[in-house]
Image: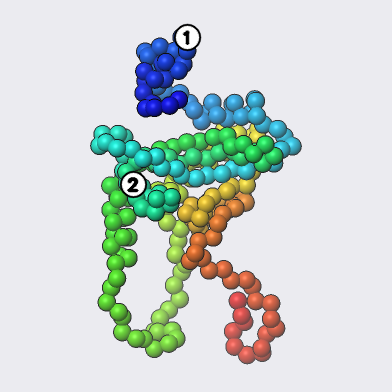
Amino acid sequence: MTGRVTMLGLARWAGPGGSDRTVQRFCSTVLPWAMLFGVCFRQHVYCPGEVSLLVGDAVVGTKAGKTTHGLDRFFVSVSGKPVPGLAFCAMSRVRVQARRALPMRVAQVVRSDAAKAASQAKAAAKQPKAPCPPRRPGRPKGSTHTPKVPVTRTPELGRINAMMAALLALRARVVPLPSLVLDGHLGKHTALHRAQQHTWPLIAKLRCDAALYGPSTGPYAGRGPHRK
């Protein structure tokens, strides 16, 4: 439909039986969309021999105003800057042969006060600081081994966990779950850790600061520690 999307415009485009009050009652009715998506996919779309992928991504729609639920400033890669609008995180099942994407889970991204404070602190930490004095090369004297940094439970990881758990509960017994595809922003070690827990293959784009090291295949020199 063209122009502004309003209740009256939806009623006009709905045809017979789609009055303004009918559209309002439908929008105010709480429907189990996740279950409806799963049932429709299993009954009308699913093909046992077809290759499919489970793709997750976030989308931002610009929106003006001050009273809309979840309205905040979100970064948009196309614009290259944060813009006011609404953000949604969705997981869709992509049919590779048919080149079609079918939504399975959609959740609105609502940033809490703690998430906003953490974002502001992270931005402040990136500000240029005074140069540190030069340090001698090598390991500092008296330092000890430290364990690896544990996986932090970020809000994005929490949304992915909730969606994956819901998909497992709805369709794992009937429809096999495919590989998980995430973009570079969501394809971090946190998402990889969660995907490994569910034995899901994760397909993602590496970040620019990612560092990968292959196992050493050279012979041992006979002295010193073994190469990792």
Give the residue type that dot 1 points to: Pro
Residue hosting label 2: 83
Q: Residue at x 48, y 26 (%)?
A: 32
* Quarter of image, res 174: top right
Q: Residue at x 54, y 60 (%)?
A: 206
Q: Are marks 1 and 2 in contact (CB under 8 Å)?
A: no
Relative horizontal placement of residue 36, taking residue 25 as reference (left or right): right
Front-lying residue, 226 or 206: 206
| Label located before the other in sequence (1 or 2) | 1
Q: Residues within 10 Å of mark 2 (few under 14, many from 20)?
A: some
Q: Position of residue 202 (x, y in %)?
A: 59, 52
Front-lying residue, 125 or 148: 125
Q: Position of residue 103 (x, y in %)?
A: 54, 35
Quarter in which the C terminus is drawn: bottom right
* Quarter of image, res 50: top right
Relative horizontal placement of residue 134, taking residue 206 as reference (left or right): left
Residue 178 higher or lower than 41, as above or below = below
Residue 25 visible here: no
Give the residue type that dot 2 points to: Val
Q: Secondary structure at mark 1?
A: loop
Q: Position of residue 219 (x, y in %)?
A: 70, 83
Relative horizontal placement of residue 142, taking residue 116 as reference (left or right): right
Residue 72 visible here: yes
Q: Residues within 10 Å of mark 1 (few under 14, many from 20)?
A: few
Residue hosting label 1: 16
List the single residue furthest toward the front.
Answer: 2
Q: Secondary structure at mark 2?
A: strand
Q: Residue at x 57, y 68 (%)?
A: 212
* Quarter of image, res 27: top left
Q: Which mark is residue 55?
A: none
